[in-house]
Structure formats: C-alpha cells, structure tokens
Amino acid sequence: MTNSLEAALALSRFGLGARDGSLTAIAADPRGALRQEITSRSLAMPTGAELRPSPALLIDLFAFLKARRLERERKAPVAQTANGLGAAMASSAVGAPPTNNAMDNRPQQVFLAEVDARFNGTMRDPVIGFPERLAIFWANHFAVAISKGPEVRMTAGAFEREAIRPHLFGRFEDMLLAVETHAAMLAFLDNQQSIGPDSRAGVRAKRGLNENLAREIMELHTLGVDGGYSQRDVTSLARIITGWTIEREQRGPHGVPLGPPGTFVFNANAHEPGPQSVLGVSYRDDGVEQGRAALRDLARHPSTARHIAVKLVRHFVADAPPPSLVSRVADAFARTRGDLSAVYVALIGADEAWNPELGKVRSPIEYLVAMLRASGARPKPQAIMGMLNALGQPFWNPSGPNGFPDTVDAWASSEGLAMRIDAANLIAQSTPGTDDPRGFARSLLGPLLSSHTEHAMARAEDRKQALALAYLSPEFQRR
Amino acid sequence: MSTISRRPLVSPSRRAVIGGAGAFFAWAFAPRPGHASGARDPRFVVIVLRGALDGLTAVPAVGDPSYKSLRGDIAFGFDGANKALPLDNFFGLHPAMANFERLYRAKQAAIVHASATAYRDRSHFDGQDVLESGYATPGHTDSGWLNRLLATLPKGSGVASNSATRGLAIGSNAPLVIRGSAPVLGWAPATLKPADAELPARLSDLYAHTDPLFARLLSEGIQTGKIASGLDVKARGGAGDPNGMEQMATGAARLLAQPEGPRIAALAFEGWDTHAQELGRLARLLGGLDGAFAVFEKEMGPAWKDTVILAVTEFGRTAHVNGTQGTDHGTGTVMFLAGGAVRGGRVIADWPGLRSNQLREGRDLAATIDMRAIAKGVAVELLDASPTNLGQVVFPGSQAVAPARGLIA
C-alpha cells in the first residue's frame, strides 16, 4: 500500500479527518505518526471558565436547584389565586421552572461550554486526532446520557475530563474505577439510590438494592453480555457497591458529612455488610475496598479483554471484526493487564486494520467533525448540537447505557442521508470555501478521492456545490 | 490547497445591525443632506446567475432560420405549444418573464444578446471568476469589479458623495463581484436556508457509479419524499428558488431605497446549469428572476427611476439541444438590463447567426458583445465612472473594450 493511501486512512479511519496540510504532514510515515500520537500521549484537555471540576459544578448545581425550588414555591400561591382552579391544578400549572430559559439554565450552559471546548477546541488542533477519537470511543463505551437529569447534564463533560481522558493511555482498570466512582455515572445508573437491604439505612428505611449500575458494569463496561456472569453475580456486585455515592449539599439530621460536597464518598450506613462472591471469588467486606477489588478483577478478566477488543476493532475497522485482529488486540490487553497504550499499538500495528476498503460509515459525530476540520467552520455549540440532533447522534445523549451503535446499519438510512445532505450543504454554503474545490478535495482525501467524485465536482454549478458534493462523496462519508 | 480567508467582509457591528429581517427598520441614519433636485441619485444592482443561463431559452432567436432545428423539442415559437412572448419579429422572451416584458414595453428593460465575458473555456468556477473578478483570466479572486468600481468612483459626487457605506452584498456569502477593499454591508434573509435542489440529482449520478449502499438510500429518500429532488423540490427559500430570490430582492431593494442607504448591490441566484429537462427548470428559475425584477420595481419606489439592474451569467450553453432535453456548457448568452434609468425597449445584439459555420466551434452561440462593454457603459453614464479607471482598475487590461454608449435614459 502506498504511503499516501495509508496517510488518508490514518486520518479518516483512526483520526478526526484531514484538515489543511495534514495529509502531507504525515505522508512520510503514516503509521509512525499515528503511533507517535499514542506514545507521546498527545491529548489536549478541554478548557474553559465553565469547565470546572465536578465537585465545584455540583455545588453550583445544588445552589441552582435550590434557588429554582424556592422560586417555584414563591410563585405557587400567586398562580393559585390567579386561575382559581384549586390547589391541585395550580401546582401542576406552575410545574414549569421559571428559570427554564437557556440563559438561566446552568446545566445546559455548562453542557454547551463542554461541547464548544471539544468541537471548537480539542478536536481542531491535532494533526490526526486518534486520542480524541479514543476519548469519544471510551465516553461512548462508558455512556452517560444528559437527558437523565440536571446532575448528569451538569457533569457529563467533567466525567469525560476526569474519568476518561486521564486514563486514556493508562490502565483499563484505572479508567473503570474512575468511571464507576464518578458523580455522572452514579447518578446515571442510579447507584446513589441503591441501599444494602441489611445496612443500617436499609433496615431503617425498608429500602434496598438497585442493580442498575452493577449489571451494566458487567454487561457493558467489562465482561460483555456473553462474558460468563450470572444474575447471582450481578446481585453480589450490586451489594458490594452499595454506599458508593456523592456527598450532597448537606446531610440530613442523622448524618455528618462524609466528605466535601460534590465528591465521591463511601456511605457505610448504606453499605450491605458481609462478604460477597462474584464469579467464584469471595470479597471480604472492607468497605470501599471490597468494590475496588471486585472491579479490578473484572477489569482483568479474559472476557473483558475480548469484549474491549471486539468493540475497538468494530469501531475502528469493521462491523464484522476479523477474528485474528480481535485475538491480537485481546492478547495485548491480557498480556499487559489492560495497558491501553499497548492495546492501541496492537490495533494499529496489524495489517488487517489498514484494509484499503472503506467498510465503515462515519458516525454523525465523526462526519460533522470531519467537515468542521476540513472547512474551518466554527459554529456555535447550539448549532453543533442542532446538527448532531438532526443527524441522529445527540452528543452524550444516547437512548440507553449501551451508548450509540457502532455499525454501518445504524447510520445508513435515507433520513440520515437527507440530513447529511442538508448539513453538508449548510457547511459548504456558510464557509468561505476555496478557489479550487477539486484541489481542496484532493488535499483532504488524497488517493481516496475517486475520479467519479472529481468528475461530479468538475461539473458542479459553482464552488459551493462542488464542496457539498465532496462532503457527500462516499469516500468522505466512509472510512 | 488555497487558504481560506477569514477577513471579515463587513464590520461586525454593521452586520449585526443588518443581521435580521426586522433590521430593515432599525437602520438609522443621520439626517439626509438632500440632493439637488433633478440630480440623479443612482442605484446599480448586479445579479449573478450562477450555473450558465441558456440565452437561447431565455430569449429565443425565433426568427433565425436554424433555430428550430437546433433546438428540437425545446424550441420556442411565436405560436404553437411552446409560445414565446414576442419582443420583435426576431427575438422572443421566455413566457415566465411577463414582468420583464411589461418593463420592456415601457422602455425600462433591455436585452443584450450573444454576449460573453472574456472567458472562452467551459469551467463554471473559472467562468464565474472571470465574470465577477473583472479580470480577463481566471485565478484573481481577491476582489470583484463592482467593489473596485465603488472604490474608484470620484469622491464628492454621486454614489461616493458621503461617508455612508455604499456597497451591499445579499446572501449568506458575498458574491466575489462585490468583495474587496471598499466596505460592504451584508444582509441575508433570516429565512434564507442554503438549499440546493440540484444536489440530490448530482449525488444520484455519483452514487450510481460509486456506492450501491448510498445509491439505495438516496433513491429511497427521494421516493419517500425525505429527500427533495429536481422539479419536485418544495419551496425552501434558497438562492436557487423563486421564494428565496424574491426575499433576497426585497431585502436588497428596501436597503437601496433608503435615502442614505447603499447604492451598489450584488446578489447571486443559483441553479442555472440545465444539462437536463431545461424547459421546466428554466420556467421556474426565470419566473424567479422575473419576480425579482418586479420586487425591485415595487420596493425601490421613487428610486426606481434612477436604478439599473444588470443580470449576468458566466457563459452560455450549446446551441444544440442535448440528449436529455437540456444543453451543455457554451459561450454566448444574454444579459438583462432593467430599471427606470435604462434606455429600454430593445434587444442590443450584433447577431452572429446560428448556422453551423456561424456557431463557435460548431456548437456554441458565438459572442459578439463583450460583457465588460455593457458594464462599463452603465458605469460611465449612470455613475460617472472614469473610462481610464474602468480600463485599468475595474476591468484590468480592458482599455481596448470601449464603454457601450446610450444604455442609460
């Protein structure tokens, strides 16, 4: 395979898409340039005034929610007398928060700032951007959805900054632990509500387990659905992680603070006492360490190595992952006890990963980012979210904890194509463009650019249309 | 790859003022100094028709003995099924252009036929560069001739008489013709969406050759109406759509009509590249252009009498109809002149004829009038532009192309 073809594949299959000059920049040694992004751990951290640590964001959120609650209570009697329909009606009539507009909506403000810091920030500078692609991959592997509520909306970005990025090139088990102890995940999968039935709090309040997080840890985050666990294992893990929660604004009359507000704390009062057995291993009850030990073992389990390998290969290379490539990646995972850098090196070092056939279709996020990088357009975050919503991949808001799907079928639809036509046209029309669209397309796609696309561009009625055709060409939509 | 210019076209504060449709009435100016009564306060509007308008469908040469046989199924006549509006006993006008015909009868509209820019190849991009940059060759995309015209008008009189910004660019992107160092206002209809009715048809062709999956999705999308295609496209307000043209014209006219508003404006209408099914598509597009002329006439009010609108395209199309009821890229075509200041009611042409030995390279309507001569003629008689500047700065290297005389009433 020629270097220029490998350079084009490095940018589209493993990167964020070419921008001005990136094909030439890596043409001498595309695989080396890709490996360099791994070994140098070249990952930018999103920044911005709103992008604070999650405890600070949560303190902000608690204050915001309290103010909103007080505002509602203040307005409620007025509404009652105004419409005279009685208390029941009135209380629902004032259900809409008075501070619901975007300017006053703190979680939405923070979320949009996080979107901006990525789509107009960290995704723009890298020559290839494999680390950013990995950040997107892992944030989707450990998916949270902002529609869950204000807590997740407020902290989804902090989750990615604090639990995903710092461990991107580190050990899988460190990422796993950071994820499962993060406010966003604990809120998203309800672990804050899970209480050991025999714990002091459970006995007192007659409440019990919520298995949601424990099940998804096994099914989605580590072993995989066929990874060899049973319902008994799920229940045991759920018991083990009872008491894993976030310190609220202030504890009730019974409790004293377990840590600073907004931080992860272990609430022994809610923790199910006693040893638990998961996958045949018994874990003695030593508080939070019981869960840490169980997660570490799950992270090192052979099923996890295979599950992660399949997902990585399916994401980057092919819907039907070549078994030899999966084995190679899983072996690297197992051999290094989940050293993710070694896993990535194994992935990109295999010839199967460089199949010149463009078997994957870019997801909407990848597609939009590729157009933004190519065009230099810098839309406002609201506009970016509008486009992603229309394209069918609302950022950090999948419909379930399994994240967005990762196969061609999921993104290849006529509705999706209709939206891509509109998005490509919008970006082609609203950016300054180029004097030489075909030269531009060649610089983006290199040898991937087909003569048919060049021909269609040459016949285009104007430059904007030629650009839209380039963005809609199969070689730009596929990778 | 060429670099992308990030230099703002207009100052952000002005753009913000003119940013939305409601801003028409937010336009505040210092009290008008008052023009001497009787003196002309001219307006000059250039409409770029991107895609290469077929002059022989817009203004069919019905009286030419070769016309009918060249055009086959898409030929017009003065009677019969495809009936053109007669302009004289030789030229007709496309029936979708009733407003323009009315203006023509009122001697406020004229046609220049068998004209072209200095460009003689057949690339849209290069052709539009030459048309808009004013240079004789492609590749000069820093500024357009209308902007340089504005910059070189004599100070202290006419258009350049005061400090107000006199250039106006309509649409989400300023056409090259008005880009340059002279400050220009930008305005786009709030509802203007960049829609491109032609894209699906072009994609359908591309995917048919390259990608069965995308070909199937596109065809499903078109069949189910999720993807608008060709003539079925719903009005979506773009620059290739009559509604969009009307909105752009309305915005431009209202701003130009302001006592201290801009005086020189550029718009671009799209979609004129009619390789197939030309009659239906041009009926729609020429109807849109015709509507735009009517909007200008109405919205300019008293300023209409001092207005010249010049509609130009990058080149013409083949004299022969092709195999898909359309025409391919050619050379000579028409220009439209409309406005109260136009000495109208005539077709300005040095007709080259349509016999095969009269066609350029045996295929195109030949060009006998240089587009620059017409633009220069308007600039001299309407705007007091200097012929020297026109020959050296506005249309560099065109000293040999004399300004046309007698275009302005």
Image (cartoon, grey):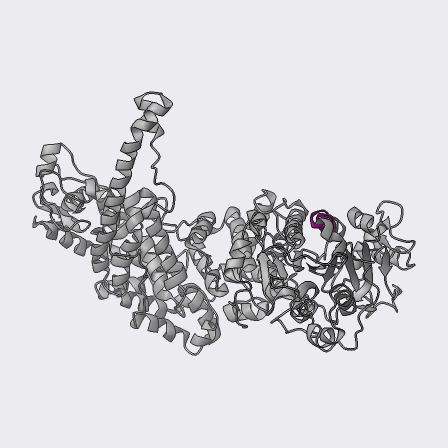
Tell me, yes or no, if residue B317 can be seen here. Answer: yes
**Relative horizontal placement of residue B2, taking residue B383 as reference (left or right):** left
Task: Decide whether residue B295 is among the magenta residues.
Answer: yes
Q: x, y (%) of residue B226?
A: 56, 44
Rendered residue at 8%/43% (across/down): A273
Is residue B395 depicted above or below A324 in this figure?
Answer: below
Is residue B289 depicted above or below B349 in this figure?
Answer: above
**Relative horizontal placement of residue A461, taking residue A296 as reference (left or right):** right
Rendered residue at 79%/77% (across/down): B400
Residue B29 lies in quadrant: bottom right
Is residue B358 depicted above or below A75 in this figure?
Answer: below
Task: Decide whether residue B389 is among the magenta residues.
Answer: no
Q: Which residues are magenta?
A: B285-300
Q: Please identify the dominant SS of the magenta region.
A: helix
Count of marks overlaid on the render: 0
Name the image quarter holding the C terminus of chain B: bottom right
Tell me, yes or no, if residue B285 can be seen here. Answer: no
Name the image quarter holding the N terminus of chain B: bottom right
Q: x, y (%) of residue A344?
A: 31, 66
Rendered residue at 24%/45% (across/down): A63
Front residue of A413/A302: it is A413
Rendered residue at 79%/59% (across/down): B55
Q: x, y (%) of residue A400?
A: 34, 44
Front residue of A208/A258: it is A258
Residue A77 lies in quadrant: top left
Q: x, y (%) of residue B406?
A: 84, 64
Residue A41 lies in quadrant: bottom left
**Relative horizontal placement of residue B305, taking residue A354 as reference (left or right):** right
